[in-house]
Amino acid sequence: MLNATHDESTKPGTAPVLWRVDDGLTGYAAAVAEMEAIAAGIARGTAPETVWLVEHPPLYTAGTSAGENELVDPARFPVHETGRGGRYTYHGPGQRVAYVMLDLRRRGRDVRRFVTALEDWVIGTLSAFHIRGERRDDRVGVWVRRPEKGADVEEKIAAIGIRIRRWISFHGIAINVDPDLSHYAGIVPCGVSDHGVTSLADLGIPATMADLDLALREEFEAVFGPTH
């Protein structure tokens, strides 16, 4: 597999990617509307490629492969249907969501390599906190081993779900910093019932959201190119 920094699908465009961080909690429906507007602007050439970092209030989202039986407690939090790939996932305070709106027409038009680059971004970011994130061929997202819980125990620390329209990406990644992990009990996260979820805090890493954002930006630039 090619290193992401040399992968044609992650070749930097002609201009730096706009890096945007919003404070407070961002409503999900408003975020989707804004993402779609930005993606449409990128397709027209009137908006820059953008990475947008937010936190959401507690909610569940259903991807295009979500099964009805995977929504265990539908009354617990609002549920949003979404056009991204994947199944049910949770968003909430203490989780960093990074929406990634990039022009894949300039980055190789290769969705598989783009997803690999997103995984590399997350794995590189976690390594800044001495966490070994790993990908799995049969499970989406980024996983960490928990040998203290058992020889074969693995837990998910980051989710990845994207949508491509006119070769412009949107949606993106979510990394657990210090969310309430009990909120995942209302769904079967990403359709995986035999593995748990974790966070930086759960792993004993006392990182702030600002700490994660700094690592995210540095690693994004290593994989995808400069930001401003």
Image (spheres, rainbow, N blue to C red):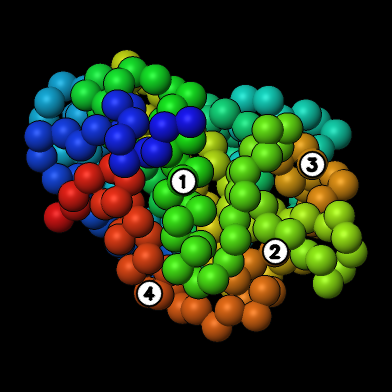
Give the residue number, with chain letter if any, for mark 4.
210
Q: Marks 1 and 4: which is nearer the front? A: 1
The first of marks 4 and 2 along the sequence is 2
* Residue 25 position within the rendered picture, expressed as x and y whole percent measured from the top left: 44, 64
Q: Nearer the viewer, mark 3 or mark 1?
A: 1
Q: First in sequence, mark 1 or 2: give its number.
A: 1
Residue 144 pos. (x, y %):
68, 58
Q: Judging from the image, what secondary structure is the residue with disc 1 in?
A: helix
Asked if one can make out residue 159 in the rendered structure from this viewpoint, the answer is yes
Q: Earlier in the sequence, mark 3 or mark 4?
A: 3
Using the image as rendered, state which of residue 177 and residue 217 is in the foreground. 217
Residue at the (54%, 58%) spot, across then down: 175
Query: What separation in Å lies between label 2 and label 3 (alpha carbons)?
Result: 14 Å
Residue kind at label 3, given as amino acid type: Val
3D distance between C-alphas at marks 1 and 4: 20 Å
Check disc 2 and give the amino acid type. Thr
Of the two numbered discs 2 and 3 on the same chain, state the one appearing first in sequence: 3
Location of residue 166 in the rendering, given as x and y in whole percent from the top left corner: 32, 16
Compared with 3, 60 (above or below) is below
Look at the numbered disc 2 and give the secondary structure of its residue. loop
Quarter of the rendering occupied by the C terminus: bottom left
**Which residue is under mark 3?**
192
* Gap between marks 3 and 1 measured at Cα: 21 Å
Disc 4 versus disc 2: distance between alpha carbons?
19 Å
Q: Which residue is mark 1?
A: 120
The residue that appears at 51% across and 62% down in the rendered structure is 126
The total number of labels drawn is: 4
Earlier along the polypeptide chain: callout 1 or callout 4? 1
The answer to which quarter of the image holds residue 3 is top left
- Residue that mark 2 sits on: 198
